């Protein structure tokens, strides 16, 4: 059984654990460097990136998280987690981990009341038609050359990959569709 760490400072930790359970993977809450030692992959969940970034700083986790990504094990950042995984964030910037060569534009899809669900564009390969839930989502901009777009919604990149790192602007843990979690695992 694969063990998948979920950064458990704040945000959608339980919903990700549920999504992992549905595909037969074990969720491991991560709050200390030692929790990263024996996990096969890692999720940085959605939530509030300001709060999560403060927690990363307080718990001195930035360097351990970077070392984890450099170990080659897969890392997925969803929504606030996609902001944290970026090389830079804009619109009330928060400190990021710099794991994927892109700029995350915070709240660029609007406020809470602008939350919406939309299908991934037909050209999105394995993810075509996937229902994507957006909640105060960041937009992914200035993608570096090594960043591959795996899914788009209305032409905008919503799921991208750079090597072992994935960024997802929507919330794959809030639907029954397991495609993103399966990719990670
Ligand atoms: N708007 C939040 C932020 O910038 C992210 C929202 C989410 O994760 N659903 O941190």
Image (cartoon, rainbow, N blue to C red):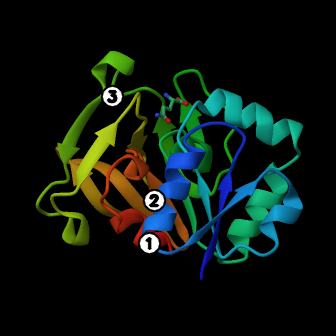
Q: Label 1: few (<14), some or many (≥20) within 10 Å?
A: some
Q: Mark 1 against mark 3, which lies toward the viewer?
A: 1
The quarter of the picture where residue 137 lies is top left
Residue 80 sits above or below residue 163 on the image = above
Q: For this rendering, which residue is in front, 146 or 153? A: 153
- Tell whether circle 2 marks a residue whose Cβ is less than 8 angstroms from ligand 1: no
Task: Looking at the picture, tell me which residue is in the foreground, 93 or 5.
Answer: 5
The residue identified by callout 2 is 19
Res. 145 in view: no
Q: Which residue is mark 3?
A: 109
Q: Quadrant of residue 32?
A: bottom right
Tell me how far mark 2 sits from mark 3, CA to CA: 24 Å
* Identity of the residue drawn at 66% across and 76% down: 40
Which numbered disc covers residue 23? 1
Q: How far is the residue under mark 2 from the one under mark 1? A: 7 Å
| Image x and y of residue 153, in percent | 21, 47
> As drawn, is 150 to the left or to the right of 28?
left
81 relative to 153 in the view: left or right: right
The percent coordinates of residue 41 (x first, y second) are 62, 70
Asked if labels 1 and 2 touch by Cβ distance under 8 angstroms, the answer is yes
- Dot 2 falls on a residue whose secondary structure is helix
Secondary element at image label 1: loop
Q: Is 53 rendered above or below residue 126? A: above
| Label 2 Cα neighbours within 10 Å, binned few <14 / some 14-19 / many ≥20 | many
**Nearest to N terminus: mark 1 or mark 3:** 1
């Amino acid at each position: 059984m694969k063990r998948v760490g979920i950064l458990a400072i704040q945000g959608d930790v339980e919903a990700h654990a549920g999504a992992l359970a549905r595909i037969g993977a074990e969720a491991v809450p991560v709050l200390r460097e030692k929790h990263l030692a024996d996990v096969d992959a890692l999720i940085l969940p959605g939530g509030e990136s300001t709060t999560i970034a403060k927690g990363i700083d307080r718990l001195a986790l930035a360097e351990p998280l970077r070392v984890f990504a450099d170990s080659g094990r897969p890392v997925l950042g969803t929504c606030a987690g996609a902001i944290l995984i970026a090389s830079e964030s804009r619109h009330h910037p928060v400190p990021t981990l710099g794991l994927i060569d892109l700029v995350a534009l915070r709240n660029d899809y609007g406020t809470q009341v602008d939350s919406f669900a939309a299908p991934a564009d037909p050209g999105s390969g394995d993810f075509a038609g996937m229902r994507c839930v957006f909640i105060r989502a960041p937009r992914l901009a200035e993608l570096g050359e090594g960043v591959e777009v795996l899914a788009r919604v209305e032409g905008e990149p919503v799921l991208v990959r750079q090597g072992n790192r994935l960024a997802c602007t929507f919330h794959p843990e809030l639907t029954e569709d397991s495609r993103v979690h399966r990719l990670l695992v």
